[in-house]
Image: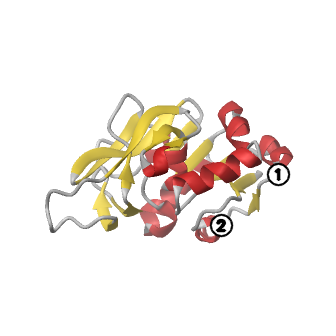
Amino acid sequence: MKTIIIKYPAGNVQSVLFSLERIGVKAMVTDSKESIQNAEKIILPGVGEANFAMKYLKEKNLDLLLSKLKQPVLGICLGMQLLCKFSEESSTPCIGIFDFFVKKFQSIDKNAKIPQIGWNTIQKLKGPLFENIPDGSYQYFVHSYYVPLGEYTTAKTEYIVTYSAALQKNNFYAVQFHPEKSSYVGHKILENFIRL
């Protein structure tokens, strides 16, 4: 099975690679259009700035390629936000798979730090990504921007506001949290994706 991690200027690519290795999956990190088109599973990870990341994807024409893929695609953190329509971060038009506008957290509570960094629960889980994952499981989050709730929400969580912890539309899956940093449950979510 050929699994591709898309190479672009975003952090945590190596963390995802190592996490897949721990569950017995050898993945390749590349920005080759041919390799991505021929892959069975594709992961768009990311920790970074939306505008900078989108510029790279557009230069390589990967934004257009991603939107046309028919095999399972998983966006993680920034990768999830880039699969949406628009991000408030640097007013960035994104890939547009999910018809959502990514918003910046606005803290009205001095105890609610931005970015959100740490463990939080995910609830109302649905879809194949969460098979055998208990509702209320903890996952690790690091982000300043969030995707609101909507028709493609498959898990939600709460920090300042209630927002989408995961999305699914057809063959596109996305999670705001970092399964590669979320111990057994996170690895199980990655396994579920690989088995799709």
1 or 2: tag closer to the N-terminus: 2
Q: Please state which amino acid type lies under the numbered disc 1.
A: Ser
The residue shown at (29%, 61%) is 120
User: Taking 181 as reference, is 164 left or right?
Assistant: left
Q: Please state which amino acid type lies under the numbered disc 2.
A: Leu
Which residue sits furthest front? 90
Foreground: 166 or 81? Answer: 81
- Using the image, tell me which numbered label, if any, was put on residue 32: 1
Q: Which residue is mark 2?
A: 17
Residue 136 visible in image: yes
The residue shown at (66%, 34%) is 67
Q: Residue 103: percent from the left, percent from the top?
A: 36, 45
The residue shown at (37%, 59%) is 144
Label 1 and label 2: CA atoms lie apart by 17 Å
Q: Residue 35: percent from the left, percent from the top?
A: 83, 49
Q: How is the image coloured?
A: secondary structure
Which residue sits furthest right? 34
Q: Determine whether the residue tagged by mark 1 lies in a helix, strand or loop.
A: loop
- Image quadrant for the C terminus? top right
Residue 192 visible in image: no
Q: Nearer the viewer, mark 1 or mark 2?
A: 1
